[in-house]
Image (cartoon, helix red, strand yellow):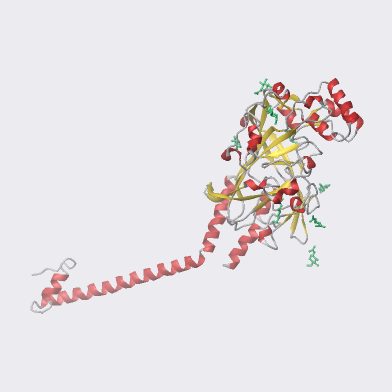
Amino acid sequence: LLLLLLLLIIEITLTEGSKIFATWKNPPPPVYMEFFIFNVTNPDKFLKGEAKPHLTTMGPYTYREYRPKHNVSFVHNGTKVAAYTAKIFVFEPEKSVGDPNVDLVTTVNIPAVAVMNRIKGAGFWVSSGISMYMGSIGTTMFMTHTVQELLWGFKDPLLSRLKTIRPDTDEYFGLMLHKNSSDDGEFVYHTGEQNYLDFGRIYTWKGEKMMSFWKSNQSNMINGTDGSGFHPFLSKEERLNVFTPDLCRSIHMRFEKEVELKGIPAYRFTPPRDVLASGKNNPENEGFCVTPKKCLDDGVLDVSVCRKGAPVVMSFPHFHLGDEKYAKAIDGISPVHEHHQTFLDLNPTMGVPVRAMKRAQINIHLERVTGFPLTRNLNSTIFPILFLNESVVIDDASAARIQKLLLIVTLVSHFPLILVALGVILLLVSIILAIRFYQNKVIATTQNTLATASNHPEHPSNRLKNGTYIGMMPVDKS
Ligand SMILES: *[C@@H]1O[C@H](CO)[C@@H](O)[C@H](O)[C@H]1NC(C)=O
Ligand SMILES: *[C@@H]1O[C@H](CO)[C@@H](O)[C@H](O)[C@H]1NC(C)=O
Ligand SMILES: *[C@@H]1O[C@H](CO)[C@@H](O)[C@H](O)[C@H]1NC(C)=O
Ligand SMILES: *[C@@H]1O[C@H](CO)[C@@H](O)[C@H](O)[C@H]1NC(C)=O
Ligand SMILES: *[C@@H]1O[C@H](CO)[C@@H](O)[C@H](O)[C@H]1NC(C)=O
Ligand SMILES: *[C@@H]1O[C@H](CO)[C@@H](O)[C@H](O)[C@H]1NC(C)=O
Ligand SMILES: *[C@@H]1O[C@H](CO)[C@@H](O)[C@H](O)[C@H]1NC(C)=O
Ligand SMILES: *[C@@H]1O[C@H](CO)[C@@H](O)[C@H](O)[C@H]1NC(C)=O
């Protein structure tokens, strides 16, 4: 029994030969990344301060993601494994609403806002110089580009100009620029060999056990796994930690409900409200507000510290789990839990995801910047640019394999019961056999008796016996 359990645990650790290792290294189920982009229909009115921005959603633009791991090496005597995960995005026209090379979207001129944000403290003359230059090349607060350009990059005239002054500037801008076929740096994971509870837990990211973007050690901690797997034997009370490099932070999830997919039972874990709560509502998050006095409210995370100063704010789509003022400030935004939550459906016995949906929204913090007349009438706004849904559903082959393993686990965990059941069955069978045997004997005896009785009609028990066995013994009563 112990041996079988041990075998199961070995199956679940990341070791060179294990099945889990092969699927971990090159995950078979298809991952889809869907982008839903917000188009502004009243940019001029908004800039004049006359109306709330009105947004319409365009999407999905879907990309199939391939995530092979490379440079995989076991370290620390096989207790840890180091790897890089490259993400390759391939456009899926059938799952998309249109051609990203054709469809035009109007949105915030993010490079311009980033430039303004970066030189905010540089003094009046610098601001005025840049502002005049922006005026001369016709930079506005909103830009119109194709979906392809917005995502994968275009050459921006303002950034090109800046590059002549500061050569380290990238003249291209795109929300997913350089993300195709690139990785998030080296991860070192625990293999779970020492302790199965450590399976998949991140040991270091880019060689560090902690980040340094945020203000507190608690915020800088790299907690949990990368979300692609968890330790076996999960409980409903557990707080599951996941580190996401896109957010530059760890988040946690809580049990929501039981679900089932492809015949596999699963627990749905989802981030609770306190994950993105502001520091005043959740002291654990105090470290995520890097500039005091400019702390944001619930449901949004300013990630400019890890985006080279660009005023990027992450949230759940439609400001789900956020302060309602953010959604109220924009027309066309209304959060719905089922449509906008992030969740992981995990088989509790194995700790493997059977379905995952990671949903996030990228926003830009717009506000008045002194020295830039373009921003004169702006109210401070968290302006949504797009939201994404990165989803995966277990493939049929893996589902079948997991079902088989679950069956083994069920058998193993019910092994004593099965033994007892077998014993009971054996006992019943032998009792039945014994009864049959006894009855046959009785019948045989009765037949003899009857036979004898018919020979001696005066036998005192004759009438009784005859009556009792009348149905069973078709003895000719002559
Ligand atoms: C996007 O908004 C612009 C106006 O800002 C409008 O002309 C265009 O038709 C919109 N596109 C879509 C796809 O809604
Ligand atoms: C901008 O903010 C001011 C003061 O908070 C408010 O009165 C005004 O209605 C806001 N404008 C818009 C367009 O939301
Ligand atoms: C991966 O390994 C190859 C050789 O096997 C090496 O040339 C390359 O630099 C490694 N990449 C990283 C990111 O370490
Ligand atoms: C690896 O194992 C050897 C001997 O078992 C031990 O001396 C060494 O300290 C271990 N190294 C690490 C990094 O754990
Ligand atoms: C990403 O790169 C792959 C191969 O390098 C290519 O096939 C694919 O079209 C690229 N995707 C995008 C969105 O450019
Ligand atoms: C953060 O951790 C480092 C080392 O891990 C320690 O030296 C430092 O005092 C800690 N800072 C705070 C604010 O706790
Ligand atoms: C990381 O985990 C520790 C201990 O469980 C917790 O105190 C801390 O808040 C977590 N950090 C994040 C960013 O989730
Ligand atoms: C991802 O989420 C969006 C928004 O709720 C939804 O429209 C879309 O169907 C989801 N994608 C999948 C594959 O479920």
Residue 298 vertical placement versus 81 (above, below): above
> Residue drawn 73% across and 32% down?
380
Q: Seen in the image, is 400 located left or right of residue 12?
A: left
When the figure is inspected, residue 146 is found, relative to residue 246, above or below; the finding is above
Q: Residue at x 37, y 71 (%)?
A: 430
Q: Quadrant of residue 390?
A: top right
Towards the viewer: 448 or 318: 318
Q: Position of residue 37 (x, y in %)?
A: 67, 30
From the viewer's side, name the closer residue of 35 and 427: 35
Quadrant that contains the C terminus: bottom left
Q: Quadrant of residue 189?
A: bottom right
Q: Look at the picture and state if 281 lies above or below 418.
A: above
Q: Position of residue 309 (x, y in %)?
A: 81, 38
Tell me residue 252's x, y (percent).
Answer: 66, 50
Ligand 2, what quadrant? Answer: top right
Residue 258 appears in the figure = yes
Residue depicted at x 17% and y 68%: 473
